[in-house]
Amino acid sequence: MRNEFYVWSIRQLTADKNHNAFTGAAWFQGALYVAYRQGDSHACNQGRLVVMRSRNEGVRFDTVGVFRGEFDTRDAHLYADGDRRLFVTGFECDESGLMGSGHEFSGTAWTDDGLCWSAWTRCTGADGYAMWRPQTRGGRFYCAGYTEHGRVGMGGTTEVSWFESRDGLCWEKQRSIHAASEDIPGECSFDFRADGSVVMLMRRDGPRVGSKPLLLRSAPPYEDWQQVELDVRLGGPALWLVGDDIWFSGRWYLTEFVTHVGVFKVVEDKPMLQMVLPSGPWNDVSYMGVARHPLNRRRFALSYYSVHTANDDPQVSQIYHPDIYLADITFTADYLTDWQVSEVLEGATLRTATADQAAGWRGLTAFDEESYAPGFVDAQQVIAKRRGVIFFRTSFDVGSTDAGVLHLGFDGPVQARLNGQVVCKGTGGNPALPDRLSVPVSFQRGVNELEIALDTNGGGAIEAVGPPVGWPCGIFARWEAVE
């Protein structure tokens, strides 16, 4: 089984006495935002949406907004119209509660700078629908809204419908996607392919369908929807695309009473479990937010909530007071594999060393996709614990591409040159992680030359302990075109 991803970090973002749950995540104007519902319990009239911002890629957060409607305001979601406007959305559920004949009022607030927000405003054109996780593309807004318990829709059945909007506030129902009383369809998460087609995951809670979700596909104008049932019991769905691959997560039921946050890849329309994030074992988990990095289409911040960590105060029930977590994950890609590597220029520094001084060049090939570190160029035997600078060289053909991004990972301090020009410097650290540094660059059409000078970090980088047992010293490198 190939290694599909690297997990950079999993951080706990809250640790208080509230019920923290139902998350959303988005990048906006170079900062990472995470939103969640904060309340006294899973369903209560005190529910409100909290929005936090990080300006160092998710290491530290500050609260920048708190929003509440008339009733319990829940199911936070974040999405951005490029860098023009950031939206937080959710819906209000009145006092009759989630399991009764209550009503949903979807709402939103927005900001143009990440700090100054509008007031919470109810959406129009979707009365009775929970407008769950809307998205925007090409200046237009889209959402799969659902009605609960047949209060709105076709003959009392639960229904999911496709909505469109010009501003994310005033919605127009286009058509019903799925309505079936035995299915009890609900929350939907979707992503767009480059051609505008949609891939969607639809939650179903009906006992006759085993609470198994539907995977749906549609192309503009989104009139016809192909669907297939996925053989996994799942709630709180989140779906995202990595290249051509479909990934999803949610509340994965191992049994009726034991759940975890599972991460799956769709292979030939079948769910293949790839990872279980720290979570569970009780049922109050998942509702993942998905934020694709603005400079790296294969790096994602995944927010979720779980009850797996007890509060420091033993009087606070672990089962009923979940917290928010954030995973930083890079999905593996096509790395630059064929390199020429020099001998170590012993005693040299990045300030003094040049590739012209280097000698003893030899070929090295990056680890393949079946290894524990696909794409890694292992220079351990060349470095042999010596202090100094080692050079890596390769060339690659970008065709007619003019602009793109270099993604680099490295064990020690580096300096990278593209076609003879310095394009970046970085400090690095052991173990090397792919895509630690993403640098926008200008390519020359056709073949480009990449040179990376790596300080061996005192020659002792290989002494550091990392998976699986002491990672060697070397680099990751790849490039991609700007869409």
Image (spheres, grey):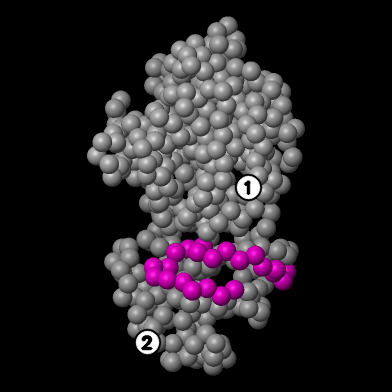
Extreme-left residue of the structure: 314
Position above or below: 262 against 158 = below
Badge 2, how many Cα within 10 Å: few under 14, some, many 20+?
A: some
SS for callout 2:
loop
Q: Residue at x 65, y 81 (%)?
A: 420
Residue 187 on image: x %, y %:
52, 27
The image shows a total of numbered marks equal to 2
Residue 115 tag number: 1
- Magenta span includes 18: no
Residue 322 on image: x %, y %:
36, 37
Splitting the image into 4 quarters, where does residue 88 fall? top right
Q: Residue at x 33, y 38 (%)?
A: 307
Q: Amino acid at mark 2?
A: Arg
Residue 6 on image: x %, y %:
43, 56
Residue 77 on image: x %, y %:
55, 36
Position above or below: 35 against 216 = below
Q: Is residue 319 left or right of residue 209?
A: left
SS for callout 1:
loop
Q: Amino acid at mark 1?
A: Leu
Q: Earlier in the sequence, mark 2 or mark 1?
A: 1
Main SS of residues in magenta: loop
Residue, disc 2: 386
Q: Is residue 282 left or right of residue 336?
A: left
Position above or below: 422 against 133 = below
